[in-house]
């Protein structure tokens, strides 16, 4: 799928990493593309004429969302609704960045077609509803993923919360690869992540002195195991890598 990719959230961790990997991404600042303003989204679409709209803007502070519910909802649900409204009838393909938090998180290894919900916190609720909003569009892909900045930025990490998240420099190239092969992804939902691990196991990779802690110490309800089944992406990835190397060889 050739042509420009218009992106929201381009100044965030994932957006910054993706822009470094994909020069075709156009990521206007919020002053030019504000997802909470429908007309702003419409103007950006008209100006840039993208083939793909990558919606990565989100309110992601899980704990603070409990106190800032209106702001969280306005960005995650209202912003997604504005994107969908602006894209209706345009033929532009929507790629929506979602999260593993849409699952309850009691058993892990969640597949793309597993039922979502119920949710444990307000952030998770907002992202679950946003996914449902996206599915109004016939041309869409929901990418569920999870990433952290590197090195681990906190003094502690949970030993009793299991996840498939990884550092953004690991996840971003995977998503970039998927975006380049978008036309050949036969799914409307795809999990892009890495192997199951505790948050503590992830943290010590980049911060050996991190101290163990428990999710029960958190100020918000957190899941026990939200690891993702990534077999669909695992099976697609070799073909996409082969095609990418062939394309570079032909240059």
Image: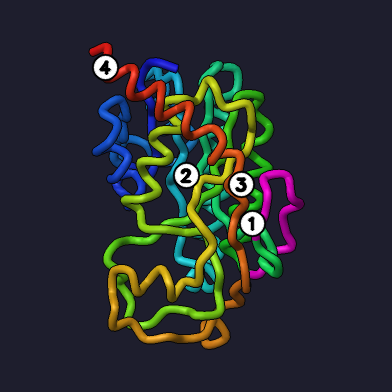
- What segment carries the magenta color? 109-120
| 2 or 1: mark nearer the eye | 1
Q: Of label 2 and label 4, which has the lower sequence position?
A: 2
Q: Of label 3 and label 1, which has the lower sequence position?
A: 1
Taking the image as shown, residue 9 lies to the left or right of residue 124, namely: left
Quarter of the figure with residue 184: top right
Q: For the residue labelled by badge 4, is the local secondary structure a helix, a strand or a loop?
A: helix
Mark 4 and mark 1: Cα distance apart in space: 40 Å
Q: Which residue is mark 1?
A: 102
| 3 or 2: mark nearer the eye | 3
Residue 130 numbered mark, or none: 3
Q: Is residue 112 magenta?
A: yes
- Circles 2, 4 touching at the beta carbon (< 8 Å): no
Rendered location of residue 236, percent (x, y): 54, 32
Residue 249 numbered mark, or none: 4
Q: Is residue 224 visible?
A: yes
Rendered location of residue 195, percent (x, y): 51, 57
């Amino acid at each position: 799928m050739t042509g420009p990719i218009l992106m929201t959230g381009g100044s965030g961790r994932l957006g910054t990493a993706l822009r470094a990997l994909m020069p075709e991404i156009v990521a206007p600042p919020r002053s030019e593309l504000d997802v909470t303003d429908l007309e702003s989204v419409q103007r950006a679409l008209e100006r840039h004429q993208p083939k793909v709209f990558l919606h990565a803007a989100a309110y992601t502070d899980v704990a603070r969302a409990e106190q800032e519910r209106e702001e969280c909802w306005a960005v995650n649900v209202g912003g997604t609704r504005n994107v969908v409204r602006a894209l209706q009838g345009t033929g532009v393909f929507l790629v929506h960045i979602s999260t593993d938090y849409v699952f309850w998180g009691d058993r892990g290894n969640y597949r793309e077609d597993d039922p979502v919900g119920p949710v444990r916190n307000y952030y998770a609720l907002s992202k679950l509803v946003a996914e449902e909003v996206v599915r109004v569009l016939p041309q869409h892909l929901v990418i569920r993923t999870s990433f952290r900045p590197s090195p681990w930025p906190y003094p502690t990490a949970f030993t009793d919360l299991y996840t498939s998240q990884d550092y953004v420099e690991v996840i971003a190239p995977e998503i970039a690869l998927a975006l380049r092969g978008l036309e050949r992804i036969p799914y409307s939902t795809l999990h892009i992540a890495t192997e199951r691990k505790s948050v503590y196991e992830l943290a010590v990779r980049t911060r050996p002195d991190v101290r163990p802690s428990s999710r029960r110490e958190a100020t918000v309800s957190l899941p026990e195991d939200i690891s993702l089944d990534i077999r669909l992406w695992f099976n697609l990835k070799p073909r996409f890598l082969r095609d990418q190397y062939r394309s570079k060889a032909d240059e």
